Image (spheres, grey):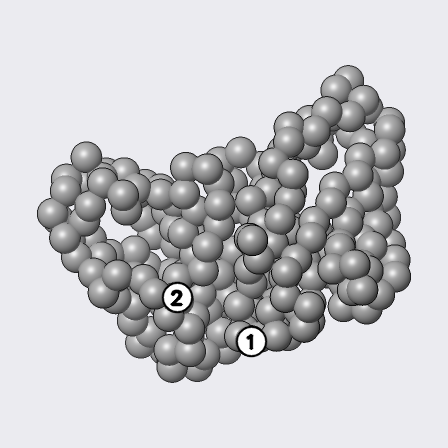
Amino acid sequence: DTAVSQTPKYLVTQMGNDKSIKCEQNLGHDTMYWYKQDSKKFLKIMFSYNNKELIINETVPNRFSPKSPDKAHLNLHINSLELGDSAVYFCASSHMGTQYFGPGTRLLVL
Amino acid sequence: QKEVEQNSGPLSVPEGAIASLNCTYSDRGSQSFFWYRQYSGKSPELIMFIYSNGDKEDGRFTAQLNKASQYVSLLIRDSQPSDSATYLCAVTPIQGAQKLVFGQGTRLTINP
C-alpha cells in the first residue's frame, strides 16, 4: 500500500552517463514534484507537474528533463551526469497543499 | 536573506522536557506553514501544518504561527528519544502556491 514510490533506491554511476529515476503515486493526487537534497540536507524543489503539465521549473540545468506520462507518474531523466549531481532526489505528490514524499533515490556520481 | 531560516543546531534536550524549534520566513504573503520530520536516511514526513495565526495542537506537538513577526515554531512536549531527528520548516510562498520552500532544518537530539 505504498503511497509514493521511487526506483531505484540507489544509483551509482560514472560522470557523463545518462540515468533515469521513476516515481509513482497511488494517492490520486493531481500534483507531483521532484526535490533535490544536497549533502547539507537542504531540500530544494526542482520541478512540479499538475495533471501532466509542467507548472514549476526552478532554474534547473536542462540536462534534467522530467516527464509525466500520466498524473500518477513523474520520471526524471538526467543527461551527462556531473559530480555535483550527487544528492538524494525525492519525489512527492500533493493534495490541498500538503505534500507527501517518496523514499528517495540516492545518486552518487563518480 | 534566505527565504526560510532555521537554526541548524544541533539542539539537545533532555528526555521529558519541551523541545522548541523555531523558523522565520521572508515572504510576508506566505500562505501555509508546515513542519516535517526527517530521520537520518529517510524521507521527510509531515508532522503538522498551520494556516492561521495562533496555536494548533496535535498530541505532543504544538505549532505556533505569528504572521506579523513572520515566525513559526514547533513545540514538542514530553520529548522522547524517538523524537531525535531533523525538523524541517516549510512555507508556501504567495507566488507559486504549488511549491514548498524549505529551511535548512534543525537537528534535534533527545538525551535519555
Residue at 33% of width from left, 74% of height from top?
A68
On what subunit does the disc labeled 1 rest? B
Q: Is residue A10 visible?
A: yes
- Are the residues under marks 1 and 2 on the same chain? no
Q: Where on the picture, by quarter, is residue A15? A: top left
Residue B104: percent from left, percent from top: 56, 44
Judging depth in this view, the residue of B69 and A89 nearest the camera is: B69
Residue at 30% of width from left, 67% of height from top?
A66
Callout 1: SS:
loop
Residue B9: percent from left, percent from top: 64, 31
Residue at 56% of width from left, 53% of height from top?
B1
Marks 1 and 2, how far apart at CA: 13 Å
Residue A82 vertical position relative to residue A50 in the rendered view, above or below: above
Residue at 64% of width from left, 60% of height from top?
B26
Looking at the image, residue A11 sits to the left or right of residue A33; the answer is left
Residue B68 vertical position relative to residue B23 in the rendered view, above or below: below
Judging depth in this view, the residue of A33 and A84 nearest the camera is: A84
Q: Residues within 10 Å of mark 1 (few under 14, many from 20)?
A: few
Looking at the image, residue B86 sits to the left or right of residue A106; the answer is right
> In the rendered image, which residue does mark 1 sit on?
B95
Judging depth in this view, the residue of B107 and A97 nearest the camera is: B107
> In the rendered image, which residue does mark 2 sit on?
A58
Residue A95: percent from left, percent from top: 60, 72
Q: Where on the picture, by quarter, is residue A10? A: top left
Quarter of the figure with the C terminus of chain A: top left
Callout 2: SS:
loop
